[in-house]
Image (cartoon, grey):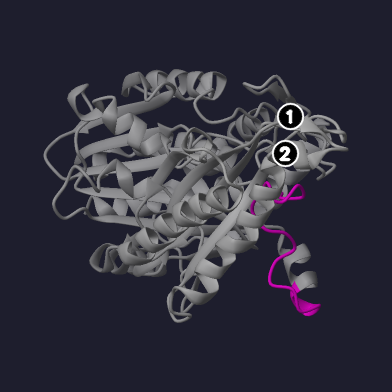
Amino acid sequence: MRKYTWLFIITAFLLCHDLYGQYPLVKQLVDADSLRLVEIYKDIHQHPELGFTEKRTSAIVAKELQALGYDVVTGLGKTGVAGVLHNGDGPVVMYRADMDALPMKETTGLPYASTETTKKVDGTVVPLMHACGHDAHVTWLLGVAKVMVNMKNIWKGTLVFVAQPAEEYIQGANAMVKDNMYAKGVPLPDYLFGMHTTPYAVGYVENIAGNRMAGSTGMEVIFNGIGGHGSAPHLAKDPVIMAATAILEYQAIVNRSISALNPHVITVGSVEAGTVANIIPTTATLKITTRWYNDADRDLMVNGINRVDSSIAFANNLPPDLYPTVKMGGSVYPVKNDTAMVDKINAGLKKNLPNIKQITGTPPTMGAEDFPLLVINSKKNPVYDFMFVGIGNPEVCAKHSKSGKAYPYNNHNPNFAVDLSAIPLGAIIGSNVLLELFK
């Protein structure tokens, strides 16, 4: 096991050696710390935790930041952590990493693959996996935090690191702010920065100004019915049929109510109903996500879903007390990167890390992020940038590219794997960005 660990570290060193030009001290510091960072990454990867339950992960972050001399605030929004370092007069820069994992089974076959499970509120046991790279995000944060302490003599200002819970629920950032984070010793930033894994090959980054990710609103619709025997559906009111009808009708909102030129999505990602084949249940639950780039489309989809639900209840002759109930979930605005901040960061990367390949011209995605909520409701003109960093094995990525595939896997895939050479690389990129922002 140790032999393979060192093999990965040596590979990472050789790759990194060709990539870095300016700020040689950053590379030296990360090279010296790379073994520790890789071990931290593997440990977090093997112990994934769902949103708002990241107690083990947040304890690691708090311990590491305290050891480096940061003023640490814990328990923000249940499990969030903030570390603050005051270093003279200058801007306040916040670096955010999310911590939560996903309820899915890992199939990577890696020697440090997750075998963890957890029990949900309803009693069911589900496997856990870091399939979106949040384990790498936390590790990058810890690597960057150490570099910035060791380079205090060349930057001035206040540095804030935020380890955020529950990004996958798009609720964690808002939970931290609502927990009075900015009244508990955490300064409001002038600049907010974050990095996210993407299955580009290691050595590529994507940092583009303007709209980059969609807004999202989550909903849970519970169709109520009257239970009965599967052999006599005429004596019951079947909520499964109602839910199935709704799933199809929601797509008419997408296809016939909103311009095809406007990016928008309604996805039902979970259907929960019944226990056995011959019992008509009393309820059926749909968990829905909507994606959008303007408020009008968001409102049209949410209101349309409610109208569809009510019309189905009416068609099934349900009494008013059995009409569907709706629980609104997390909601976030589109991610719109600040142009001046993006230009400043990209110019710095081009100068200081000349062999890092910058991807340009890619369109916005329908993915969503709650990252901007750390500042978007607290500042009149929030300035933030959300960058994507390649973590795919270069040889694997090249092989799939030749076969016409964009990626070997995508985020939220059970085969999602972060190449270990991306761990030191991410720490170097993040450190260079922060040093540039403090100029």
Secondary element at tag 2? loop
Image coords of residue 408 (percent x, y): 75, 63
Q: Earlier in the sequence, mark 1 or mark 2?
A: 2
236 shown above or below 292: above
Q: Does the magenta-highlighted stretch encompass residue 415?
A: yes
User: Depth check: 142 or 164 in front?
Assistant: 164
Give above or below for 153 relative to 250.
above
Write down the region rendered in magenta.
401-420
Query: Can you give x and y, in whole percent of width and height, for residue 226 in the image?
Result: 67, 33
Question: Which label belongs to residue 17?
Answer: none
Please give the name of the residue rendered at 53% of the width and 35% of the height, measured from the top-left corner: 322
Amino acid type indicated by mark 2: Met
The residue at 38%/66% (across/down) is: 297
Q: Main secondary structure of the magenta part?
A: loop
From the image, tell me which residue sits under label 2. 104
Q: Which residue is mark 1?
A: 126
Q: Is residue 40 left or right of residue 309?
A: right
Where residue 38 sits, quadrant-wise, is top right
Indicate the quadrant containing the C terminus: top left, top right, bottom left or bottom right.
bottom left
The residues bearing labels 1 and 2 have C-alpha atoms spaced at a distance of 7 Å
Residue at 47% across, 38% down: 320
Residue type for callout 1: Val
